[in-house]
Image (cartoon, grey):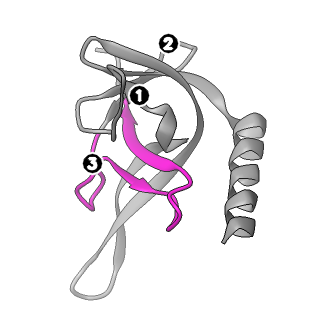
């Protein structure tokens, strides 16, 4: 599987270089600056009649799992964490309908896909 691992590493590097942006990930008093690729997920529900209805949309962040280091430890995203873009906009990390705030992008764990919603100024 070395060839596949090499190809996925090249893909990750190219994607981050082409579409990545620097974000600040925050948990409590700890922050880390890392590169993320922004995307989105739509969660649907299927009614008893088979009708598919949009349930919610999230802003997703693809990050290299080893880059999420908080207080000297590699961590997984959790509800209550925050992501801040360079323009100052803030996103709250929240679970999608599957109940977790993140999932791996693929079976080889190339990226963490972190689900969030943009915080609305009050």
Say which residue label 3 marks.
Answer: 95
The magenta segment: 94-118
Secondary structure of the residue carrying numbered label 1: strand
| Depth order, front residue of 64/39 | 64
Secondary structure of the residue carrying numbered label 2: loop
Gap in angstroms between the C-alphas marked 1 and 2: 21 Å
| Above or below 1: residue 10 | above
Gap in angstroms between the C-alphas marked 3 and 2: 22 Å
**Mark 2 crowd level (few <14, some 14–19, many ≥20, 10 Å Cα):** few
Residue 29 located left or right of residue 66: left
Sequence-first disc among 3 and 2: 2
Residue 62 placement: quadrant:
top right
Query: What residue lies at 38% left-to-right and 39% top-to-bottom?
Result: 116
Secondary structure of the residue carrying numbered label 3: loop
| Depth order, front residue of 105/2 | 2
Residue 80 placement: quadrant:
top left
| Above or below 59: residue 73 | above
Question: Can you give x and y, in whole percent of width and height, for residue 19 in the image?
Answer: 72, 38
Say which residue label 1 marks.
Answer: 69
Say which residue label 2 marks.
Answer: 88
Residue 47 located left or right of residue 118: left
Q: Of the residues tagged 3 and 1, which is closer to the observer?
A: 1
**Mark 3 crowd level (few <14, some 14–19, many ≥20, 10 Å Cα):** many
Query: What residue lies at 53% left-to-right and 50% top-to-bottom?
Result: 111
Question: Can you give x and y, in whole percent of width and height, for residue 88 in the image?
Answer: 49, 12
């Amino acid at each position: 599987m070395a060839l596949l691992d090499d190809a996925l590493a090249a893909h990750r590097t190219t994607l981050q270089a082409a579409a990545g942006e620097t974000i600040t990930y925050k948990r409590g008093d700890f922050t880390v600056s890392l590169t993320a690729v922004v995307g989105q997920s739509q969660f649907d529900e299927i009614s008893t009649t088979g009708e598919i209805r949009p349930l919610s949309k999230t802003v997703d962040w693809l990050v290299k799992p080893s880059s999420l280091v908080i207080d000297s430890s590699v961590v997984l995203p959790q509800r209550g964490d925050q992501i801040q873009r360079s323009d100052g906009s803030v996103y709250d990390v929240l679970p999608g309908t599957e109940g977790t705030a993140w999932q791996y992008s693929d079976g080889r764990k190339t990226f963490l896909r972190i689900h969030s919603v943009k915080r609305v100024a009050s």
